[in-house]
């Protein structure tokens, strides 16, 4: 019997609890020391049964609540704003799951991805298992696309007329506003691999915003492409990620990004990495399927 999206999300919630508990407990107790049980009871508004190992009895909802409400005091010291957003998202996911709300393919993948990112940020081995679940979910698109109307993302797709390329990059909320829209004082996109033959042909860049937007919404002309050695885009906002060196590039815009479309995802899988199109195709497209194949 195939696994349902509801079951997948439930499994991810279990792994989230198991993976977060050691980290959350350690940081909380180290900060509050002898007062940790009393503070925990105040947050949860109920007594703790086992005061020697207080975090053991917390379910996922309680654990996320503790991290959220203790963020400024405790967890911001080791996690960044990106992870704080993930905690908020996962609280919504857990509540939806608890109320037996249905999860679409997009919903399930976003839930798994958020749980995977948060566990990875605290170096939990549970991140690896959720990563496998994400791959299995993507695999379903290849095994039974007629069941869900979706299409597995294939290898990099390059239009036949690639003399004036647009590179479309998937973005999350924080990096979209900070980098693509220039709220970090520079309109650019970086940490992207580009083959040497394509660098001279790329004239524009477009942003696909991940769920809940799930659409290409902005594009910008590319002024220059240069080797990138700096902070990873994932953690640039809070500056906690290791430096990136190697065969990656930075695309600097010649002018600020403009709105386009939006061009919704439609019934194809969300892009998991950059892909190429042309400006003419981008301007004519009604959905992402028009750019990535029907």
Image (spheres, rainbow, N blue to C red):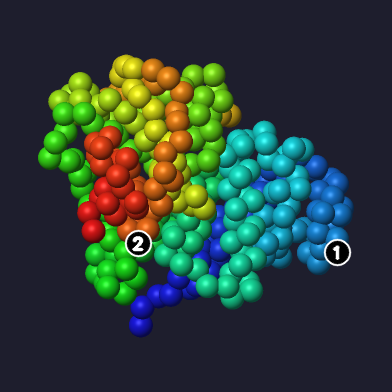
> Farthest front residue?
284
Q: Read off the residue under disc 1.
A: 47
Using the numbered discs, state the Cα–Cα distance from disc 2 to disc 1 in whole angstroms.
48 Å
Position of residue 26 measured from the top left corner of the image (x, y, whole percent): 67, 46
The quadrant of the rendering that contains the C terminus is bottom left
Q: Read off the residue under disc 2.
A: 267
Residue at left offset 28%, top offset 61%? 151
> Can residue 58 be seen?
yes
Residue at left offset 45%, top offset 31%? 258
What secondary structure is marked by label 2?
loop
Front residue of this view, candidates 57 and 280: 280
Q: Is residue 117 above or below residue 162?
A: below
Mark positioned earlier in the residue sequence (2 or 1) = 1
Front residue of this view, candidates 232 and 218: 218
Position of residue 104 measured from the top left corner of the image (x, y, whole percent): 46, 67
Left or right side of 231 for 74 = right
Position of residue 238 measured from the top left corner of the image (x, y, whole percent): 58, 29
> Can residue 30 be seen?
no
Nearer to us of marks 2 and 1 is 2
Question: Counting other residues with Cα less than 10 Å from the Cα at mark 1, is it few (<14), some (14-19), or many (20 or more)?
Answer: few
Front residue of this view, candidates 157 and 190: 157
The quadrant of the rendering that contains the N terminus is bottom left
Left or right side of 41 for 184 = left
What secondary structure is marked by label 1?
loop
Residue at left offset 55%, top offset 65%? 14
Left or right side of 43 for 216 = left
């Amino acid at each position: 019997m195939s696994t349902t999206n509801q079951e997948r999300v439930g499994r991810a919630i279990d792994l989230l609890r198991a993976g977060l508990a050691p980290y959350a407990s350690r940081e909380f107790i180290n900060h509050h020391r002898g007062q940790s049980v009393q503070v925990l009871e105040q947050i949860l508004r109920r007594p703790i049964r086992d005061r020697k190992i207080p975090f053991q009895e917390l379910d996922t909802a309680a654990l996320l609540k503790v991290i959220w409400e203790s963020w400024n005091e405790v967890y911001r010291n080791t996690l960044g704003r990106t992870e704080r957003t993930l905690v908020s998202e996962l609280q919504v996911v857990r509540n939806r799951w608890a109320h037996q709300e249905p999860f679409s393919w997009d919903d399930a993948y976003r839930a798994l991805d958020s749980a995977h990112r948060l566990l990875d940020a605290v170096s939990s081995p549970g991140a690896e298992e959720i990563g496998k679940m994400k791959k299995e979910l993507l695999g379903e698109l290849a095994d039974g696309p007629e069941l869900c109307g979706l299409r597995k993302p294939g290898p990099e797709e390059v239009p036949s007329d690639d003399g004036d390329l647009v590179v479309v990059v998937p973005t999350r909320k924080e990096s979209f506003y900070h980098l693509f829209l220039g709220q970090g004082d520079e309109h650019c996109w970086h940490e992207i691999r580009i083959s040497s033959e394509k660098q001279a042909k790329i004239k524009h860049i477009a942003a696909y915003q991940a769920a809940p937007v799930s659409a290409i919404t902005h594009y910008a002309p590319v002024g220059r492409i240069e080797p990138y050695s700096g902070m990873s885009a994932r953690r640039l906002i809070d500056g906690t990620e290791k430096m990136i060196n190697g065969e990656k590039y930075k695309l600097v815009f010649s002018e600020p990004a403009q709105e386009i479309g939006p061009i919704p995802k439609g019934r194809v899988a969300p892009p998991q990495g950059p892909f190429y199109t042309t400006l003419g195709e981008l301007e004519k497209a009604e959905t992402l399927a028009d750019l990535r194949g029907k």
